[in-house]
Amino acid sequence: MSSQHKQPPARVPTLTEVVALDAAAAHAQAVPQTDPDGAETMAQRVATEVNPPVDSMFEQRLREALAPGVEALMQDLLDQFRGEFDVLLREAVGRALAQGPSTPSKLP
């Protein structure tokens, strides 16, 4: 290794300094680039025309894919609700029978 050390530069620029740009570079940064060949416009038009049929097809395929799972869930829920209803109905009938026959009310 060398015992000589390099001397740092006399002046080191800092990040807070403003660097002067030439007029053309400043204008290029300030003005957004336009789409001279219309590719962006064409892409937007194609997307606008293609989007509705694609959305419709996507929705249809999603429904077809989810239908078996939704049907199975609905059947499970119905079975569960029927079981709970059966238990509640049996409890209500049991309570009514435990109270004994009530005196029939006379209808007017």
Image (cartoon, rainbow, N blue to C red):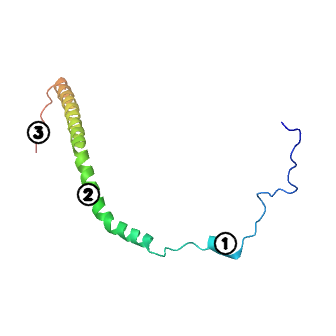
In which image quadrant can residue 57 be found?
bottom left
Q: Which mark is residue 87?
A: none
Left or right, 43 with respect to 29, comes to left
- What percent of the width, then of the height, locates residue 47? 36, 66
Q: Residue 25: which numbered mark, if any?
A: 1
Establish if 62 lies above or below 93.
below
Q: Would you place residue 77 above or below residue 57 in this image?
A: above
The residue identified by callout 3 is: 106
Indicate the amino acid at tag 1: Ala
Q: Which residue is mark 2?
A: 57
Name the outermost residue toward the front.
2
Determine the CA span between mark 3 and mark 2: 66 Å
For the residues labelled 2 and 1, the Cα–Cα distance comes to: 48 Å
SS class, disc 2? helix
Count of marks, rendered view: 3
Q: What is the x, y in percent for residue 103? A: 13, 31
Q: Quadrant of the N terminus?
A: top right
Is 49 above or below relative to 56?
below
